[in-house]
């Protein structure tokens, strides 16, 4: 977990130094709002299609869960920074042993999530959804991921223009 702690510290450092100024940037704030709306659409679809309940059941059984330990290592400083800008309180320790650092008893503690966490449909979910609903879900999830990419690119550009850290993110 040392690498994720380093990334979290890095994101917290950026947030501490530049968070207020970033949140004063109207373009980035608007992009974050669009991203949140798209995240909300994905979450609503996950709830409506029983994806959330199925994933929760799988994680609770402790086998085959996509929210396995070390998934947090897939995250990077920028995605963690985006969560901080969205007001997320990052966990200091695992709530559920053997699972992702960001998984809590009620689901993921993050708002902006890694692409695998958003759009992976395991065989159990594919059976549940069927091809048509799976395609509909992937379309909604893809919109979320695209909005996140836009925010990330804007943040990278902002940081490169306003800091002395050249492309270190």
Image (spheres, rainbow, N blue to C red):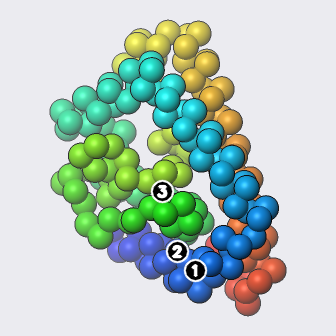
Between 38 and 71, the one nearer to me in the picture: 38
Which residue position is annotated with label 2? 11
Residue drawn at point x = 45 percent, y = 72 percent: 8
Residue drawn at point x = 26 percent, y = 37 percent: 59
Residue drawn at point x = 68 percent, y = 36 percent: 143
Left/right placement of residue 51 relative to residue 149 reads left
Left/right placement of residue 159 relative to residue 41 reads right
Q: Earlier in the sequence, mark 3 or mark 1?
A: 1
Measured in 3D between alpha carbons, the distance from the residue under mark 2 to the one under mark 1, in whole angstroms, is: 5 Å
Q: Are marks 2 and 1 in contact (CB under 8 Å)?
A: yes
Q: Residues within 10 Å of mark 2 (few under 14, many from 20)?
A: many
Discs 3/1, front: 1
Measured in 3D between alpha carbons, the distance from the residue under mark 3 to the one under mark 1, in whole angstroms, is: 19 Å
Q: In the rendered view, tell whether residue 31 sits above or below residue 57.
A: below
Q: How many marks?
A: 3
Q: Are marks 2 and 3 in contact (CB under 8 Å)?
A: no
Which residue position is annotated with label 3? 74
Q: Position of residue 70 (x, y in %)?
A: 35, 56
Q: Secondary structure at mark 2?
A: helix
Q: Residues within 10 Å of mark 1 (few under 14, many from 20)?
A: some
Measured in 3D between alpha carbons, the distance from the residue under mark 2 to the one under mark 3, in whole angstroms, is: 15 Å
Q: Quadrant of the C terminus?
A: bottom right
Q: Position of residue 92 (x, y in %)?
A: 29, 70
Q: Secondary structure at mark 1?
A: helix
Which residue position is annotated with label 1? 14
Between 48 and 125, the one nearer to me in the picture: 48
Between 32 and 132, the one nearer to me in the picture: 32
């Amino acid at each position: 977990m040392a690498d994720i702690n380093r990334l979290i510290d890095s994101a917290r450092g950026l947030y501490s130094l530049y968070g207020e100024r970033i949140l004063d940037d109207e373009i980035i704030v608007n992009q974050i709002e669009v991203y949140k709306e798209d995240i909300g659409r994905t979450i609503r679809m996950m709830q409506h299609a029983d994806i959330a309940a199925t994933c929760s059941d799988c994680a609770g059984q402790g086998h085959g869960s996509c929210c396995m330990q070390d998934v947090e290592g897939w995250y990077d400083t920028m995605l963690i920074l985006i969560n901080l800008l969205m007001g997320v309180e990052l966990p200091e320790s695992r709530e559920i042993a053997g699972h992702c650092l960001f998984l809590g008893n009620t689901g993921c503690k993050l708002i902006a999530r890694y692409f695998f966490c958003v759009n992976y449909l395991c065989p159990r979910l594919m059976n549940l959804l069927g091809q048509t609903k799976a395609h509909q879900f992937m379309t909604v999830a893809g919109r979320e991921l695209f909005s996140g990419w836009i925010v990330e690119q804007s943040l990278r550009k902002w940081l490169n223009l306003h800091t002395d850290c050249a492309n270190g993110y």
